[in-house]
Amino acid sequence: MKNIVVILVLILSFSSCKKEIEKTHIKVEEKIPEIRFGYKIDDYKVIQDTIKNGDSFGAILDKYHVPYPTINQIATSIKDVFDVRRVRTGKPYTILASKDSLEKAQVFIYKHDKINATILDFKDSLITATNFQKPIKVIEKEVSGVINSNLSVTMDSLGLKPNLTYTIADIYAWTLDFYKLQKGDSFKFIYEEKFIDDSTFAGYGKVKSAVFKHKGEDLYAFRFIADSIKNIPEFYNEEGNMLRSQFLKSPIKFKYRISSKYNLKRRIAHYGYRVRPHRGTDFAAANGTPIMSTANGTVVESRRKGGNGIYVAVKHNSIYTTKYFHMSRRKAKVGDFVKQGDIIGYVGSTGSSSGNHVCYRFWKNGKEVDPFKEKLPTAEPLKESIKPRYFEYIKPLKNQLDYNKMPVQEPEFIKETIAEN
């Protein structure tokens, strides 16, 4: 019996010693501090919120125990980097506050979007404002599709967001009428997607190249910077001709219909069906739809007058002037230089108008003409000296577009090239 007791004591002792030995081999892992926006988050009380209607920079900081003399000092010292009056409702922000009982704000981080933020640091006597950008991963992707109804519906069915649709529409605005696409037309795009934190989608990057098959014809578009000094990208076709024309085909980007064309013998209901020449083209659209200048130029009129209602006139050069009638409101004023595609006003029904539309009028050498029957100037093609470099540049892009060109109904991501931005 004594022997059994001794054996049990030895076993328990050995087991206890073994546990002690095991304990000595346990590796204690140190907690890696979380760093956000360049700050060790564990050192602060983190407050995340969204700017609400009626909020101001001063009211927010006052809520977190920053006195108004300090708030005024902050606003004055960083005004060249960040105007505190321009904080916008709906924008998220983060406050890093002290971890004591007062929880006083020490850092204010205003998030412009998913990538960009402005950091105001006032925890010490030195007040600083810095612009912050999260690291971006850029992935090149391809997608192809077939038109069944319209571009927007097809892009949406492929899981692509409207911003990419708008970009494609801008690229082809001068060469393709998206309201005349036919069922069975197809496309293929090579474009970029941006991500933060490896997996959070942060928008689209460049569209590098594209091809639209419309009425049996391949319409190519290649992004290329011809002038390294100006550094302005343009889109050219496979022959080196610029897709952008000097004039847009329409002053409205999407969702419009031509309700009345240029017609010198038109009878107008508003005037008792008497013959009244119509020297413009009416683009019907919803009230408030943005109206674009169809070419670069200077605003020479911006006013409200009689039957024209609220309108803007843009002088493009010594030959061409365009006018945009019946706006609900104007965005451009006399003397403004506007670029092609800039918004100059919004669709309305002011003046002699029976519905929401913009009456687009076109002057050539002081005479109103129908722009859709005029041979208008196009943008200049690439210089001959640049074409060899251009053709060499687009060769792999065109091969990529032409490879397996038969489109599919689901997104076909053939290639993903990752680049750190």
Image: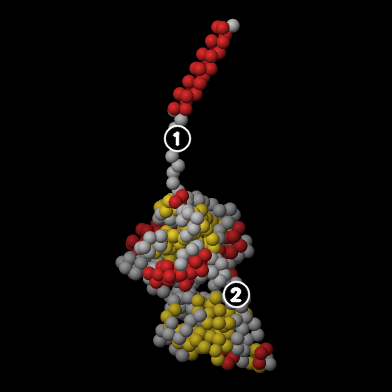
Q: Residue at coordinates 51% horizontally, 85% vertically from top-left? A: 312
- Give the foreground label among 1 and 2: 1
Q: Quadrant of the N terminus?
A: top right
Residue 175 shows in the view: no
Closer to the camera in the image, 299 or 401: 299
Closer to the camera in the image, 368 or 384: 368
Q: Position of residue 140 (x, y in %)?
A: 46, 54
Where residue 395 sits, quadrant-wise, is: bottom left
Q: Residue at coordinates 40% horizontally, 66% vertically from top-left? A: 233
Q: Position of residue 359 (x, y in %)?
A: 57, 83
Q: Residue at coordinates 45% horizontally, 42% vertically from top-left? A: 31
Q: Which residue is mark 2?
A: 256
Label annotation for residue 28? 1
Count neighbours of disc 2 (C-alpha within 10 A) and say few if under 14, some if 14 to 19, many if 20 or more: some
Mark 2 belongs to which amino acid? Tyr
Of mark 1 and mark 2, the one earlier in the sequence is 1
Q: Position of residue 171 (x, y in %)?
A: 48, 67
Q: Position of residue 320 (x, y in %)?
A: 45, 84
Label annotation for residue 10? none
Q: Secondary structure at mark 2?
A: loop
Q: Residue at coordinates 56% horizontally, 53% vertically from top-left? A: 411
Q: Secondary structure at mark 1?
A: loop
Residue 173 shows in the view: yes
Seen in the picture, residue 227 relative to 96 is either above or below; the reply is below
Mark 1 belongs to which amino acid? Val
Q: Separation of disc 1 and disc 2 at Cα?
A: 67 Å
